[in-house]
Image (cartoon, rainbow, N blue to C red):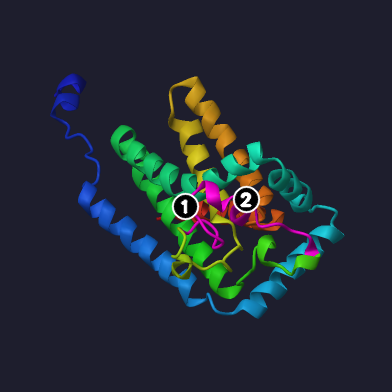
Amino acid sequence: MSSTAARAGAVPRSRPRWWAELSLIALVYAAYSAGRLLVAGDTGRAVAHGETILRIERALHAAPEHVLNGVFTHAAWLGIPACFCYATLHYLVTPGVLVWLWRRHSDRYLFMRTWLMVSTLIGLVGFTLLPTAPPRLLPAATGFHDTLAQYASFGWWGGDASAPQGLGGLTNQYAAMPSLHVGWALWCGFALWRYARTPWVRAVGAAYPVVIALVVLGTANHYLLDALAGAAVMGLGALLAQRR
């Protein structure tokens, strides 16, 4: 049989069924959300962990949160868009990139999906073992401002991070370590940079995790060490996904 005939008779690799993938992703996200809520009550320990992280950063002279938070809080033209980014992109861009991979890059979809899921579950372990208050929930003496609460009148969120007003009880505000906002953004950025064919889309992929890192620090939702931990979690997730 010729190589041409062999190629013609080959069965192309089909993408996973959408309903099975959607069910699996929903199951992992439900476990992620439930796990965050299970450890939501240990406020004292979470605040102590947050203060410890801040002390470590200051000792290393690597604590940009105060400067960024001051800029985002006092410059509404930066603070308001940053709040919208924090409250929306995490939940829109990530599933959007997953769908794009499923439709356009089915040969890479399974690895990328597994990488994202494994990393998310590792992050859940971090939330459970190390509940951490974000900078905005530390005592006032630390000098942080709750940027989302300040600009809540411009959006749907209240004083409970990105949760809609009145639904703060459905989220755990003490799950700052590691930052999966940064972790998921790195995953999205890699996917766009690696697999997109259009130069400007690849540029967006390269910029996206940087923008999200600035947003989470400037709105006082994460520490620099949270962001670095989010990147480390994604790195470990990628290594484990390759071994499946």
User: In the image, is residue 130 above or below residue 110?
Assistant: below
Q: Are marks 2 and 1 in contact (CB under 8 Å)?
A: no
* Residue 163 image position (x, y, % from top left): 47, 59
Closest to the observer, 199 or 46: 46
Front position among marks 2 and 1: 1
Magenta residues span: 142-163
List the single residue furthest toward the front: 153
Question: Percent x, y for residue 81?
Answer: 57, 40
* Vertical side of 191 occupied by 69: above or below: below
Q: Within 10 angstroms of label 1, few (less than 14), some, or many (20 or more) residues?
A: some
Check if residue 147 falls in the magenta segment: yes
On the image, which quarter does residue 130 sit in?
bottom right
Residue 243 seen in the current view: no
Q: Which sits in the foreground, 169 or 27?
A: 169
Left or right: residue 49 compared with residue 212:
right
In space, the residues marked 2 and 1 are separated at their CA atoms by 18 Å
Amino acid at the residue labelled 2:
Val
Q: Residues within 10 Å of mark 2 (few under 14, many from 20)?
A: many
**Which residue is rendered at x = 72% and y = 50% of the image?**
69
Q: Which residue is mark 1?
A: 156
Element marked by disc 1: loop
The residue drawn where x is 45% and y is 21% is 198
- Residue 153 is covered by the magenta coloring: yes
Q: Which residue is mark 2?
A: 216
Q: Which residue occupies the foreground of this view, 221 or 38?
A: 221
Answer left or right for 164 relative to 69: left
Place of residue 88 in the rendered image (x, y in percent of width and height, measured from the top left): 47, 47
In the image, what residue type sits under mark 1? Trp
The structure residue drawn at horizontal position 63% and vertical position 69%, both measured from the top left corner, is: 132
The tag on residue 191 is: none
